[in-house]
Amino acid sequence: MTQQKQTQNRPFSERLLAWFDEHGRHDLPWHQPRTAYHVWVSEIMLQQTQVQTVIPYYQRFMQRFPDITTLASATQDEVLAHWSGLGYYARGRNLHQAAQLIVAQHHGEFPQDYDAILALPGIGRSTAGAILAQAFAQPYAILDGNVKRVLSRYYAIEGWPGEKKIEQQLWQQAEALLAAVPSSRLADYTQAQMDLGATLCTRSKPRCDQCPIQQDCQAWQLGEVNRFPTSKPKKALPTKQACCWILRNSLGQVWLQPRPASGIWGGLFSLPETPLAQVGGLEFEMLEKFESSVQSLIEWPSLKHSFSHYHLMIYPLEVTLNDQASIAPVQINEAPPPYADVLVTSGRWFDVAEALTLGLPAPIRQIIEQLQVGKAEQLI
DNA sequence: AAGTCGGGGCT
DNA sequence: AGCCCAGACTT
């Protein structure tokens, strides 16, 4: 079974390594010499940071701190001074602290044991694997952003790689593929995966035509490379609230007014609107305008409407006036956008049937349609 | 599982 | 103007 698995996985590493020999990056600064210290420092710097950004920092760092002992005996301030501009300064602090740990606990020699490496601050599973494979030719897998992207496509894995379950699947595949790699090529294989992800299997516009594993890539076979890896789920949309005013006159007509040309529902006819947060404030102020002529006030059940960037809860208030002359234009400017405007700007009374011929926002149309239904019921 | 750290590149 | 990046760590 293990033998069959290796046979199945051989094309991946064989094709990848053949491609790497010709097109891979063999001239990176941390490849000469490729000691554990050099690989370690480069891997820490490369966390969440691109190669071109890292190179000048790496060179200055190595010139000042050529070995573990020098790094360990430096002050943290001087280490951080060489980190300045790279960001994620905890990386620099951890690097310095780990160097002192290595001096204190490992006689200044970088440990070759997985658990000992993983115990060093700033080194997680993937970075530990990268060091072991590249510096010590030990069979440990990596799973950085590059490998996650390559494997998500190669196996057409559905689901965001940041999800625990998906990440677990990816580790499993990474280790299965590693089993077919010749022990003499573990360092190159590790670098090759990252080179493929960084130069061909990029997040956007991947160069599939040049990819050595294109024919076995399941995302490619599906013709859906751009669908993998599944993107991070977006945050839950915020919910905003607004009160809309169903103003009726003695003829059963409803007041509608055009919305501002820009912003949500730009230019459409709609009901007057106030922010719900202003209950007792603007709403009270609104009612005062009609106080002498309000015949009834009905609170409707709320409606929910969703946009691409937020949900909107609408709380309709139906105000019936006992004549048709008492509604004077009222401008309330205090409300924040996107519901800044409100009441009665330039609108007029509409028969319900006529209102339904206008361009209306979908939830407002629903309300108006209910007015029509209500009227029909009244007639019966 | 979600938040935090960060400057830089890409669309 | 977001989104993502050779992640690890804390909450």
Image (cartoon, coloured by chain):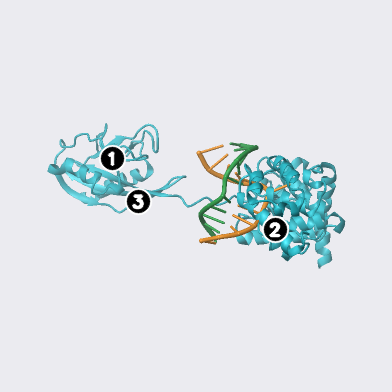
Chain colours: A cyan, B green, C orange
Tags 2 and 1 both on a single chain: yes
Q: Chain of mark 3?
A: A
Q: How far apart are the two marked residues, 3 and 2, measured between alpha carbons?
A: 62 Å
- Which residue is painted at 67% across and 54% down in the image? A96
What is the x, y in percent for residue A267?
36, 33
Query: What residue is pinned by disc 2?
Result: A100
- Which residue is painted at 85% across and 47% down in the image? A18
Amino acid under label 2? Answer: Gln
Q: Name the secondary structure under disc 2.
A: helix
Sequence order check, earlier mark of 2 and 1: 2
Which residue is situated farthest in the bottom direction here?
Answer: A1
Amino acid under label 1? Answer: Pro
Vertical position of residue A40 compared to residue A263: above or below: below
Vertical position of residue A17 compared to residue A209: above or below: below
Query: What residue is pinned by disc 3?
Result: A303
Vertical position of residue A345 compared to residue A36: above or below: above
Vertical position of residue A233 compared to residue A179: above or below: above
Q: Chain of mark 2?
A: A
Sequence order check, earlier mark of 3 and 1: 1
The numbered disc on residue A272 is 1
Q: Name the secondary structure under disc 3.
A: strand
Amino acid under label 3? Answer: Leu
Q: In the picture, residue A369 is in which quadrant?
A: top left
Question: Which residue is more in the foreground, B8 or A272?
Answer: B8
Regarding residue A250, the answer to whether it shows in the image is no
Q: How far apart are the two marked residues, 2 and 1, measured between alpha carbons?
A: 68 Å
Tags 3 and 2 both on a single chain: yes
Sequence order check, earlier mark of 3 and 2: 2
| Mark 2 or mark 1, whichever is nearer to me | 2
Q: Chain of mark 1?
A: A
